Image (tube, rainbow, N blue to C red):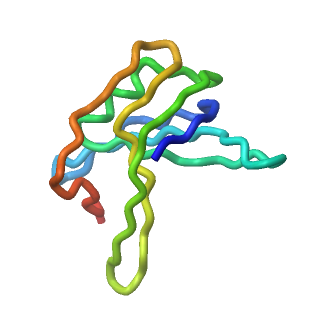
Amino acid sequence: MEVTGTVALIGDLQTFESGFTKREVVIKVQSGKYEDDLCLELLKDNVGIADGLTVGDEITAQLNIRSREYNGRWFTSVVAWKVDGGSAEPQTAQATTEDEDEIPF
């Protein structure tokens, strides 16, 4: 999938005891006459994609939407793997088939 929006927040790098890393980027997306916030997760080797972004940049992100069950509850993630636009050249991380959706808790 693909989504275009304006960068509203770039989160800090999060590293968990298992070595799993993630970074969140929130973008504002126009949805009809309303503006919605969408939190994109950058996982593992993809965390560097956010290095060339600044708040206010217009970006287009390639992403996957994933849901998983954990202890009877469902969690949905929006995982970005390519970002075009912003202050940097387009950056793409290798898309892998292994499960990158580990829940770090």
Q: Quadrant of residue 3?
A: top right
Q: Residue furthest front?
A: 1
Image point 43% across, 18% down: which residue?
52
Pinpoint residue 104: horizontal percent, then vertical percent. 28, 60
Tell me if residue 65 comes above or below residue 35 in the rendering: below
65 displayed left or right of 15:
right
Instruction: Give the tally of numbered discs.
Output: 0
Q: Residue furthest bottom?
A: 72
Pinpoint residue 100: horizontal percent, then vertical percent. 24, 53
Tell me if residue 74 comes above or below residue 90 in the rendering: below
Pinpoint residue 10: horizontal percent, then vertical percent. 51, 33
Image point 26% across, 32% down: which residue?
93
4 displayed left or right of 99:
right
65 displayed left or right of 103:
right
Image point 18% across, 46% down: which residue?
96
- Point out the image quarter for the C terminus: bottom left
Image point 55% across, 21% down: which residue?
54
Pinpoint residue 87: horizontal percent, then vertical percent. 50, 13
Q: Quadrant of residue 65?
A: bottom left
Tell me if residue 53 comes above or below residue 64 in the rendering: above
Tell me if residue 52 comes above or below residue 41 in the rendering: above
